[in-house]
Structure formats: C-alpha cells, structure tokens
Image: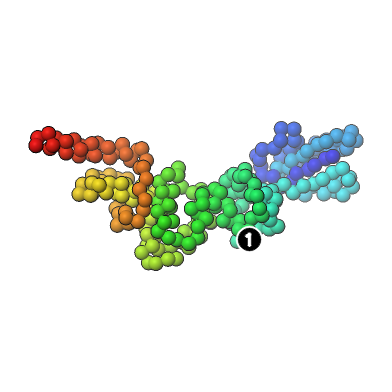
Amino acid sequence: MVEIYTGLLPAEEIPYNGHVVDNREDYISIRQLIYDALSQDAEVQVFVRTRVCDGWFWDIEEYFAEIRVINYSPFERLKQKLNIQSFPSDFPLSSEDVVQLGILDLLDPLNPVTDVKKWIVEHLLGEIWATSMPSWDHFSKLVHWFVEVEGEPSPSLSAFTDQIIKGWCSEGPGSLRSAYSRLLENPKKNAISLLTWSALSPYDEFREDWLADETWFSPVLVDLAGKIDTIVLPINIRRKLDPKIQSYWNSKLQGLIDD
C-alpha cells in the first residue's frame, strides 16, 4: 500500500520513515519510488509539503488500487479531530495558525464540537475566555487571569479575542461595561495594579503614597478594588512592596517599645 498525504505546510514534521516532497525535483524521484514500491508490494508513506505538487498524484491513484491520496491539510486534520463536517464561514484562522497555535496537539474532544471557536479559545486560553456573558465574578476571574498568565494571547487569536472582548464591553450594566473597557485598555498592567491596590487595603492611608512613584502601577481601576477577590501577588511585585510594608511594621513595633 502506498499512502500519499497532501496539503502539509512547509517544514511540518513527518514520521521518521516517511518520504517527503518539498519541491519539483523531489516529485520526480518520489514517483519512481512509488512505482518501485508497487512492483515490490512494499508499504510507503509520502508527505507532500509543497502546494505546487499537491495535485500531481491524482493520475496514479486512478490507475492503482494500492494507492491512496489523502488530504492531510491542517484544516482537514482539525475537522477530523473535532468530528465536524465544515468550519463556520467566518472562521478566522489560517492553516499556518492552526499549526503554530498547537491546536492539532490538543486532546481530542469526547463528543462532536458544536461551537468550534468557543472550543479553541477555551482550550488555548482557558474557560474564562469561553464565557460570553459578563459579570462581576467573571471580571474578577479575568483580572486574575491576566495577572497569572505569562504574556498575553497570541496575535493569531485576536480575531477570536477581539470579538469576545467586544461582547463583554457591550453587555451588562454601565459600570460593568466600563470596568471591562478600562481593564482591557492595558490588561496586564491594569490587572496587576488593581490586585495590588486591593491587597494593600489594610494600609489604606499609606498605599497611595507607596505606589505613587511605581511606574508599573496605574490607578485606572482602583475604584473597583471591592469587586475582586485578592490573590497572592506576583513575586516581583511583592519584592517592590516588602520594604515599605516592613518599614511600616518596624515603626509600629518601635512605637510599642517606646510606649
């Protein structure tokens, strides 16, 4: 049996024993290899990684029952993975995006996927991004997500995330819409700033002075500190604040000693 996999992207990895067509010169030698395999009743796998040659094997499939030409493009593999017949008409990812984002490496779903975009966002970014209805609880979790995650969503996902963010900023009461809009103007910085302000609530009369000269801090969301759950701050932020907190308690302790 000879299996010819077409539709691969340049440089995609293939099985160690597979034969590759990367250019027209490869095509000529692979054709001969296929004929040799047929005469010897050998098993051969061929992977076509250039679109120029994708359609050049149709003739031998017609004449030899031992040959199968298989569409192995990223989109076709993703359809099989998700057990779907087609993608939504507004599906924004390219074949390159599907491979680069590692979508094909995700665990296969147990059931057919009914909302492809939601499934992709949920599995690449987390359940928080699969929520379409905004709420204060969701806002708090989103703040935590931006603090905890390394970096920000891949630009390749912007077509998904922009649409989701637009929904968050247009639904719910005015104060909630405003909260999402303000957070997402500079999400990482604003999320860290909000959690820091909330974490320093026991030092209410000092925290404004403590943070005034910190370039990483923004007061954009401090009025929302009561809306979120406080978590442990990132270690780099704690290191910046520890001397100030320690100085505060040292002065308190000294006051008790003096009394």
Q: Is residue 40 left or right of residue 156?
A: right
Q: Nearer the viewer, residue 28 or 61?
A: 61
Q: For the N terminus, give its image quadrant.
A: top right
Badge 1 marks a residue whose secondary structure is loop
Residue sitting at x 70%, y 50% = 80
Q: Position of residue 251 (x, y in %)?
A: 16, 37
Q: Which residue is mark 1?
A: 88
Q: Position of residue 223 (x, y in %)?
A: 29, 57
Does residue 158 show up?
A: no
Q: Position of residue 78 (x, y in %)?
A: 66, 50
Coloring scheme of the render? rainbow
Q: Position of residue 190 (x, y in %)?
A: 36, 51
Q: Nearer the viewer, residue 12 or 166?
A: 166
- What is the three-letter code of the residue carrying label 1? Pro
Residue sitting at x 33%, y 40% = 237
Residue sitting at x 41%, y 56% = 137
Q: Is residue 137 left or right of residue 237?
A: right
Q: Residues within 10 Å of mark 1 (few under 14, many from 20)?
A: few
Does residue 252 show up?
A: yes
Residue sitting at x 25%, y 47% = 202
Q: Nearer the viewer, residue 150 or 175?
A: 175
